[in-house]
Image (cartoon, rainbow, N blue to C red):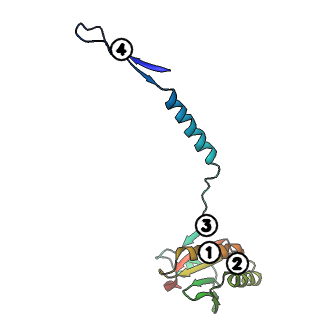
Amino acid sequence: MSVSVEGGPRGRHRPVSAELNLVPYIDLLTCMVSFLLITAVWAQLARLPVSQHQPGQSDGERISDEFRIVVVVNGDGFSLVMGTESKPIPNDYKRLDAELHAAKAAHPDKTDVQVASTDDIVFSRLIETMDVVLGAGFPDVSLVDAAGT
């Protein structure tokens, strides 16, 4: 397959004839399309369903009932706040998971947990904490600032 361009019948100008071979270009596009279609199966976005407290909301708008569960992420580990009680947990995700499963067993109808942290906490640590919270059976995770809790 090729394209031919010829010049017009002018007296002083030579006719121009150029051939472009489009077969390699079409082969390249075919390979690229098939590669993108094959790899599209593995390109799935991983996301965590997390909400964030808006600055203008009051506590009554944010949470419908009085009892709340908050996991405070700090430099030394975690603090699990359930209602008015606070329980320090060392920097151990297995222990945090066990405590959250106990909280879920004590309050089976509770589905929301707030994860609170300051700005100096590493992002990967927050993600691991949210994974533990989701794994403990709390699908409604919200991220709040530790200064606001």
Q: Residue 48 versus residue 124: which sits nearer the camera?
A: 124
Q: What amino acid is at disc 2? A: Lys
Q: What amino acid is at disc 3? A: Pro
Position of 99 with respect to 52 (left or right) is: right
Task: Give the image quarter of residue 74.
Answer: bottom right
> What crowding class fits label 1: few (fewer than 14 Cα within 10 Å), some (14-19), or many (20 or more)?
few
Image coordinates for residue 63, horizontal then vertical, percent: 60, 78
Answer with mark 4 or mark 2, whichever residue precedes in sequence. Answer: 4
Kindly report the distance in space between the C-alpha atoms of the residues bearing marks 4 and 2.
78 Å
Residue at left offset 60%, top offset 87%: 77
Position of 91 with respect to 100 (left or right) is: left
Image coordinates for residue 71, horizontal then vertical, percent: 61, 83
Residue marked by disc 1: 128
Q: Which of marks 1 and 2 is in front?
A: 1
Q: Nearer the viewer, mark 4 or mark 2?
A: 4
- Residue 110: assigned label: 2
3 and 4 marks in contact (CB < 8 Å):
no
4 and 1 marks in contact (CB < 8 Å):
no
Kindly report the distance in space between the C-alpha atoms of the residues bearing marks 1 and 2.
21 Å
Kindly report the distance in space between the C-alpha atoms of the residues bearing marks 1 and 3.
14 Å
- Residue 49: assigned label: 3
Q: What amino acid is at disc 1? A: Glu
Residue marked by disc 4: 6
Circle 3 SS class: loop
Q: Which of marks 1 and 3 is in front?
A: 1
1 and 2 marks in contact (CB < 8 Å):
no
Answer with mark 3 or mark 4, whichever residue precedes in sequence. Answer: 4
